[in-house]
Image (tube, rainbow, N blue to C red):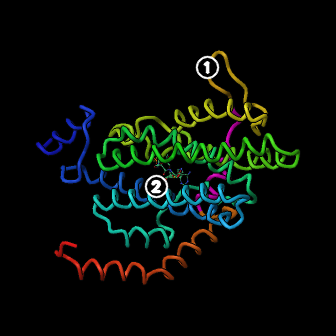
Amino acid sequence: MDKFEAAFNDIIAKDLKVEPRDWMPEEYRKHVLRQVSQHAHSEVIGMQPEGNWLLRAPSLRSKQVLLAKIQDEGGHGLYLYSVAETLGMSREEMINQLHAGKAKYSSIFNYPALNWADMGAIGWLVDGAAIVNQVSLQKTSYGPYSRGMVRICKEESFHQRQGYEIMLHMARGTKEQKEMAQDALNRFWFPSLMMFGPHDADSAHSSKAMEWKIKRESNDQLRQKFIDKTVPQAEFLGLTVPDPNCKWNETTGHYDHSPFNWDEFWAVVNGDGPCNTERLDHHKKAHNDNAWVRDAAVAYAKKTEGSLV
Ligand code: 3HC
């Protein structure tokens, strides 16, 4: 082992952070780049289902809160693309990979948001799952990713509260509103659990991710943590988690759950979800229609380069 690899291993062993200028194994760089770029794509694509409901928000306040949340998600994408760029891939190349279907984004965003209760379920469950995953990622070994997660987690907590407030309002509302909230929980429960990825035994990347301390907890550990935290929240709402086997297990100290439908998961991941085509087409159109904004920003940066404004 040469001194560079020994230095890298020492950083990992001592729970220190790998920085962009540090030597790192090419496989580590590729692994983190893959995960961070897909995380960034997920943040930006995730703006679509909620963006569709901005003009139909039931009050000015709910519109303002949803707008603030969506803007946050765009910012999260910005931080994460910037983190990914420190690993040697341009933003343009990452976007090309997304458009070419060579890069993934979270499967959850390929499900439709059918009504306002879905805005609640997305904030409560999707951002709730994101918080569990991202709090753990604050301790990831790649420095820029870890620091980006600290900032993102602060904003993510507001997102979860925003969703839960909508669910509480509807669950305490009319019979029809409570039914809408229950229907939203029914449709988003399992897809939210799938955000944590395949079972550890079926995960292509987890063993290396744990060895290099990119992941600090496994897919199944984080998923269980989310289930254990969220089921009592559903009960407080007076809603029922759509899984007859979801029962507290005194022996394990966790909630049991039914087996997951991994055929559906891989179908959605591989492009056959309800909204995959719509999401990518919308991203491509927005990217092309707004190329002038990027061109103008680059031109302005060139013009003012070096001048103190
Ligand atoms: N959707 C799409 N693809 C998924 C997926 C999902 N829910 N879960 C796993 N995959 C993909 C992986 O990307 C990998 O494919 P690849 O080799 O082509 O990249 C394959 O399935 C195998 O899965 P692994 O578990 O082995 O892969 P990872 O070790 O990368 O673990 C992960 C998957 C847990 C999602 C991990 O990548 C991760 O923690 N990513 C960072 C968090 C993230 O991306 N969250 C997505 C949602 S963003 C969000 O929630 C925004 C919030 O504001 C709402």
Q: Is residue 264 magenta?
A: yes
> Which residue occupies the foreground of this view, 47 or 242?
47
- For disc 2, the neighbor class at 10 Å (few under 14, some 14 to 19, many from 20) is some
**In the image, what residue type sits under mark 1?**
Gly
**Can residue 197 be seen in this snapshot?**
no
Residue furthest left in the image: 3
Image position of 122 (left or right of 181): left
Q: Which residue is mark 2?
A: 39
Q: Where is residue 305, by image quadrant?
A: bottom left
- The question of residue 163 being in magenta is answered with no
Residue range of the region highlighted in magenta in the rendering: 257-270
Residue at numbered disc 1:
253
Q: Secondary structure at mark 1?
A: loop
Q: Which comes before the other along the chain, label 2 or label 1?
A: 2
Seen in the picture, residue 7 relative to 279 is either above or below; the reply is above
Q: Position of residue 168 (x, y in %)?
A: 72, 41
Horizontal and vertical percent for residue 183? 79, 48
